[in-house]
Amino acid sequence: MLKDKIVRFDTVVTAFVHHWPKWLKTPMLVVTNAGQPAVMTAIAVAAGMIAWHNDDKVTTLAYAIGLAAMGANSILKHYVHRTRPDTLYVSNMYFKSSSFPSGHSFSATVVCGLLLATTTPLSTAAVVALAIVALAVGISRVYVGAHFPTDVIAGWVLGGATVWLIAVGLGL
């Protein structure tokens, strides 16, 4: 059924990613650490404070809603309660939480998406760089063994939907 297809997808994609070169381990750890929800929260708070300082109420509200959504993602993880992969990385995690959806992927997508939605003008290079950051954070989570690919995809999709709802709702 669907659960079997998800397990098969996760198994195939995880095996593929885990066969990537070993020299990627350090860069992937850097990316995964930079993508921590606490880091993304700090970036969102800073961007919101800059908007507040510039008396940009809509952008300030966008970041406040984004921060609330990141908190809601943590609540969702608690209720879905999907077990993380059985990896050395997970066994050494200081902060234990459920796997679905990926908080790193969700937070990076929300923060990068809000930066895209609230910053004008943006160069093509900036747009590409922010997209690469959100994608790299998610991929790094599978590479280091913290998540299944479907956790990451769910984080990207939910994060993208959150940004879209904020942008449409606030007219960004």
Image (cartoon, rainbow, N blue to C red):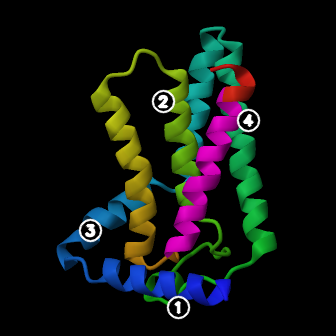
Where residue 93 appears, as percent x and y from the top left, is: 53, 78
Query: With 52 as the anchor, is 150 left or right in this view?
Result: left
The residues tagged by marks 1 and 2 sit, at their Cα atoms, a distance apart of: 35 Å
Circle 3 is placed at which residue position? 26
> Which callout, 2 or 4, points at the residue further toward the start of the chain?
4
Q: Amino acid at mark 2?
A: Leu
> Which callout, 1 or 2, points at the residue further toward the start of the chain?
1
Picture residue at 38% right of the left edge, 21% below the top:
122
The residues tagged by marks 3 and 2 sit, at their Cα atoms, a distance apart of: 28 Å
The residues tagged by marks 3 and 1 sit, at their Cα atoms, a distance apart of: 20 Å
Circle 1 is placed at which residue position? 86
Q: Is residue 96 above or below residue 7?
A: above
Circle 2 is placed at which residue position? 116
Query: With 130 as the anchor, is 44 left or right in this view?
Result: right
Q: Amino acid at mark 4?
A: Ile
Q: Which residues are magenta?
A: 149-167
